[in-house]
Amino acid sequence: YCTMENESLAARLLNPSRPVFLLGDVPPGEGTPPGKCQTICNKFMARSRALASDGFIVYDIQDEPGRSDMERPFPFRRVMDSSRYAALLARSSGKECVVYKCVADPNFDDWLQSASTEHGHSAINLVGRASSQGEYQGPTISQAMEKVTATKTVQFGCVCIAERHTLEAAEARGKSYPTEHQNMVRKQKAGCQWFISQAVYDSEPTIRLLKDYAALCREQGIIPRKVLLTFAPVSRKKTMNFIKWLGVKVPPEVEAKILDAEKPVDASVALLCDTLRTILSECAGIGVPLGISCESVSIFKAEIDGVHTLFGKLQEILLDAQGSPWKVQWVEIMPPLGPLVVKKTTKDISDNTAVTEQPTQLVTQSSIAKDVVNNVSLLNAVMLGGMLVALGAVIGDH
């Protein structure tokens, strides 16, 4: 399977035999002029186009004043609608987006109609409110799932939160054992096709959740949906505080190890790689397909660069764990007509063999347009300085 194959992002997310790799982005501020939005979009693409991603996640940012008793480390600023920005990003990059949507919106029906018809999205991730405090507007998460299920052109996923699946969380809710795995199965039966976790900094709750989810699926005779594990590197105390404000459990020893390091972002990347290795080792053979999502929760350059470094390392770890040969390849797409050059660097992982390089190959523009970056226009290529690069991981025999 290949990230550049002619297959929708929703289909890749539904395919249990294939890992999926996504990169997260936040829309520009509300009221940003269209030209500036395109500039921001182009900058994100220029930074990320050398990553072998299947597509992007575009988040729906809400104020969430009742999320935590902690003071919000970064001030809230309203951003443009996630569906609108995801449409711009998808049409500019040639890669589809998973569009996050908080269901607490009195105009949810209109939003869904616009997202599916006007903006052409086929993959939406539904998010409930962070807190039950305050007046609730819009459909419940159950009602929202029903509405999306009735929209035949759209598939949807939901979030899963390992922090809810701790013994401490269960005790706080008056439960004898955590129930997040039951929430996942309930959402799956309502039509949820995949799950995306919040940022992982502690492997133990995630391992417990994945194992309990797998066991409950087996007990009920259903196939587990794919779970994308989210990772977000940090390099400074303020970002770490924001991670914790978001509800992410960061063990004190982990926080100290990162922030006391000479290069905190490198320490964060190394620790998150170890976290994924631990999760894969402990959850091997349970039958829950996994994917990876990486995001930066700040605009701090060191952390954005750290996301890109982390993405490649986590992708390598997860692909190695599949036990099949794989390679990364990229294709340069030039606006002029005529034959185009395809450069390939192959990394075959079979008994830990070394990196090899394949010779340059020629392909026609039509074959690239069909197999690599379907629906990318000449205008977009010019806007990226005359060249687009599509990069993907190919898994299996080659």
Image (tube, rainbow, N blue to C red):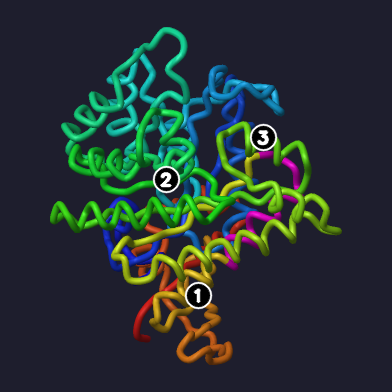
What type is the residue that disc 1 sits on? Gln
**N-terminal of the two: label 1 or label 3?**
3
* Residue 325 sits above or below residue 299 on the image: below
Within the magenta stretch, is there residue 146?
Answer: no
Q: Which residues are magenta?
A: 298-313
Q: Which residue is mark 1?
A: 329
Whole-angstrom CA distance, mark 3 to mark 2, is 25 Å
Res 270 seen here: yes
Asked if the residue under mark 2 is in contact with the one under mark 3, i.e. CB atoms within 8 Å, the reply is: no
Horizontal placement of 358 versus 149: left or right?
A: right
Q: Nearer the viewer, mark 3 or mark 2?
A: 3
Dot 1 and dot 2 residues touching (CB under 8 Å): no
**Nearer to us in this view, 181 or 159:** 181
Residue 288 coordinates in the image, percent (x, y): 32, 61
* The quarter of the displayed image where residue 70 is located: top right
Q: In the orientation shown, which residue stands out farthest toward the left?
A: 221
- For badge 3, the amino acid type reads Phe
Point out residue 350 in the picture as x, y percentages from the top left corner. 45, 89
Q: Residue furthest front?
A: 176
Between discs 1 and 2, the one toward the N terminus? 2
The residue closer to the viewer here, 208 or 121, is 208
Residue at point 72% right, 48% down?
255
State the mark number for residue 97. 2
Judge left or right: residue 346 versus residue 325.
right
Between the residue at mark 1 and the residue at mark 3, the CA separation in whole angstroms equals: 36 Å
Residue 327: x and y in percent read 47, 79
* Amino acid type, callout 2: Cys
| Residue at image coords 19%, 37% | 190
Q: Is residue 152 above or below residue 147?
A: below
